Amino acid sequence: MGMDEFQALVDNIAAMTCVVSVEDLGDGKSGKYRIVTGNRAYIDSIENPAPGAEMLTDKFTPNAEYTNYLTRDLNFEDYCYKAAVQGKCLHSYAHPDRLPLWFNMTFLPVGKRDGNICYCTYTMEINYEASAERMSDISGDIASAVLKTGIKLRGTNDYRATMNEIIKDIQRLCDAEHCCIMLMDQTARSCSVLCEAFSEDTKLLPMERYLDDSFYPIAESWESTVIAGSNCLIAKNEQDMEVVKERNPVWYESITAAGGKNIVLFPLRSQGHLLGYMWAINFNSEDSVRIKETLELMTFILGSEIGGYLLVERLRELSSRDMLTGVMNRNEMNNFVDRLDSGELGTTISVAVIFADLNGLKAVNDSDGHAAGDKLLQDAASALREVFDESAIFRAGGDEFAIIIQGIGEDALNNKIQSVRDSSENYDRVSFAIGGHVEKDSSNIRTALRLADEKMYVDKRKYYEEHPEQKRRDSKDGFNC
């Protein structure tokens, strides 16, 4: 089949279509991928592109490498290889990150081989909006896997446990050694593992082992260097991994040093915002097309669900935190006390309450202004964090903090109180009036609160006796912020 025959073939197809040649190097390896020719609609997509669909050049050259028009895309190469060399008929509906478009793509083998050069047709349709009809046009086994994921997420009361089940399902589907969903906090510039799963015989280590301060810049680079404008990365073999090495040598060394031989990597997005990534390492490369089609749809659903989950968690965090000091707020304290009082958290374990009232806040506000008072409150919270876990510290009032701890005795409580006094000395003008009390039964939390408060006021009177120059407020003013 010569050039004229190829041209006649594509000219008989109305949709944008071209002929792609693939150089078959044997053993699953390939050489050059070229756009042999295209019909008028396809050539126009290059030379007169629709807005947002511009390519690297606006001049079509017959038999030029496809990278003359597009950034190298391993997914495009994989589909062309399987169609041209292996004779498979393939379809994909994808949204490449490089363009604000959705592509409905079909790859068909051409019964022609010139030595080691094989051919396929590539037909595409462009959509400016995602088509639910196109996205749902999938095989039964893929639909089943995606539907199973959706049902699990909608019916869960334990989000983390459900995500662990889902990532295990994905690990089995990919026949991979390791699958993981990693979240990225762009504000804190940190990464965290949402869930991960391993095969039984793997020697790969948990991802947490690698998530130090140096890892975020590596993950941050994936979008531009590894995904490189596509919607995912699928590096199936040593040849594909060489592309990863070329684009991101630091990450390549990290993968291979950990025992990774291949990888599929998908970004997770919600409302266009990057949340993190999902990947599978040492997966079944023979099943790469089905894996790609399944994970494309799964990440679309998971991105939306994870985005919603993170939003709820953020709102919960905002509703439970004191915005000035960062410790838990009075509302969260009341909820915790109610749970203890009801016996929901057990009655056979002790509970200790410490009230730490900041001395001299009113005097600082009066003399130096509220900004100085705010700084004093923040320093006070920092002093308490040196002794207690942040989740146990509550801002109970304007200048009053409460600490509630289960499973602690009198001696340990007194040691904690002394530690607070010691840590306060690390901060300018931080001084607490402190009272503490232990109850053996956690459901007696309200008794502990009352007696700890009484002891705190004894300590407060002692402070003002020793510092008569500090005028004590007659009443609580409420929060300082």
Image: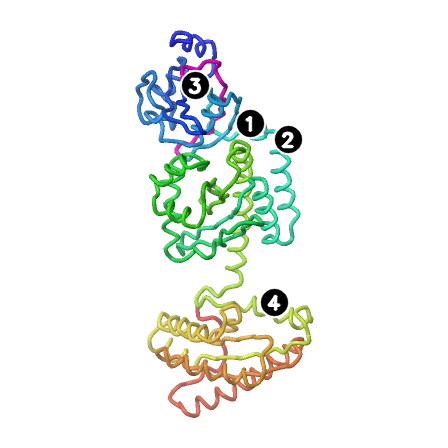
Does residue 210 belong to the magenta stretch? no
What's the residue type where badge 4 is placed?
Asn
Residue under pointer 1: 134
Q: Secondary structure beneath disc 4?
A: helix
What residue is drawn where x is 42% and y is 29%? Answer: 29
- Reply above or below: 331 against 403: above
* Label 3 vs label 1, nearer the camera: 3
What residue is drawn where x is 39% and y is 74%? Answer: 376
The magenta segment is 98-118
Decide which of tag 4 and tag 2 comes sooner along the chain: 2
- Residue 118: assigned label: 3
Q: Residues within 10 Å of mark 2 (few under 14, many from 20)?
A: few
Residue under pointer 4: 335
Q: Secondary structure beneath disc 1?
A: helix
Q: Residues within 10 Å of mark 3 (few under 14, many from 20)?
A: many
- Residue 140: assigned label: 2
- Looking at the magenta stretch, what is its main secondary structure? strand
Q: Secondary structure beneath disc 3?
A: strand
- CB under 8 Å between callouts 3 and 4? no
* Label 4 vs label 1, nearer the camera: 1
Decide which of tag 1 and tag 2 comes sooner along the chain: 1
- Reply above or below: 197 against 247: below
